[in-house]
Amino acid sequence: MLRFVPEDTQCFVVMDLEWNQHASKPNHEIPHEIIEIGAVKLDRDLRILDEQQYIIKPAVYPVLDKHIREVTGIEPEELEDGLSFERAYHRFLKWCGPGAFLCTWGRDDYPVLLRNTRYYKLPVELAPPLNVQMVFSHLKTDKPLVQVGLSAAMEQLGMEMELPAHRALNDAIYTAKVMAVLQRDVDAASAEAIETLRKFNAEEALAALSDTRSVPTGCTSHDDVLGNERMVAVRCPICGGSTRMTLPWFDTGHGRYMALCECAEHGTSFAQMHFKRLYNNKLVMHQRAYLASPERIADVMARRNAARKTLPRAARRAQRPEKGEPV
Ligand SMILES: [Zn+2]
């Protein structure tokens, strides 16, 4: 794993978070409130040095979401004695120490950490993580872009899950174990494969610095949401300011949308959007935006062109680019 991180890395810290939310009444400044940080510290050879768990008493969403409770098995009483986020994060950083490089399974945790630290006006101090899931997908599957669940990955590697999943510390321990197995594949990989992975990791670092938001739309159809320009507008991930759509939202298939937009100051961002349905049939919009590399811009253009070919002729006409649109 040292092939993917800065040379002065002293140790790896595998971090996993659990968070609480209010699905229908989110606070947009902090849609996901961290309630648990689980972390495992590994030396440069991936030997486990220490583990830590921080329970945080929620202050924004004091009531534990039913779904979160079911998935994690966390009981509300456990959180009662939890630390404030400020105190827990301070202790966590101190425990990480200098030269620690963060690792996570998947790309969800770091943006949530960013949002929570920003909410409490705390310095993040940890660079975007190595996404172990991406290393797994590249070296162990023939679909490098598919996001594999941690338990599915462990099953594929023939590893036992003797601890309950979806608790922050356990998931961090599992991720650390998967890393140790993947190390053999990293060692055996060609220079070319490592270079590809490095590029993907640089892209992942951009994605980790993305702006994510979940917004209840009050609508029941995708078209109604897409027709509301204000609702589907994208904020610049760097400054939070408004952006101009340079490639409007298009469906890449299965209700997953992409767009390119531009902040006058920070340049082009890549935006992704999908929807989840609430119990009352209303849609919640999930958006992610991050600064786009030139490769990413080219890739989105190609997808847009491919997507257009598969649409019926009438829809194709409706999607025809307007003047000045870079297609
Ligand atoms: Zn900006």
Image (cartoon, helix red, strand yellow):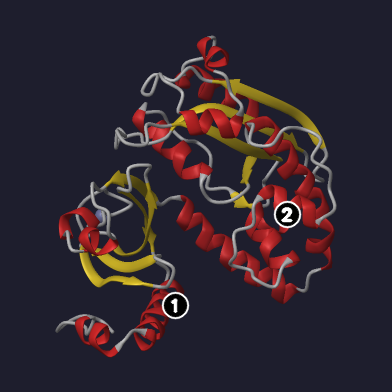
Q: Is residue 25 left or right of residue 171?
A: left
**Camera-side residue: 256 or 47?**
256
Using a 10 Å C-alpha cutoff, classify the residue at mark 1 as few (fewer than 14 neighbours), some (14 to 19) or many (20 or more).
few
Element carrying mark 2: helix
Residue in the picture at 50% in, 43% down: 110
- Displayed quadrant of residue 17: top right
Residue in the picture at 42% in, 79% down: 303
Give the residue number, with chain letter if any, for mark 2: 153
- Displayed quadrant of residue 168: top right
Seen in the picture, residue 57 relative to 281 is either above or below; the reply is above
In the picture, the disc for residue 299 is 1
Amino acid carrying label 2: it is Ala
Q: Residue furthest top?
A: 81
Q: Give the image location of residue 26, x and y in percent.
A: 31, 34
Element carrying mark 1: helix
Q: Is residue 15 left or right of residue 111?
A: right
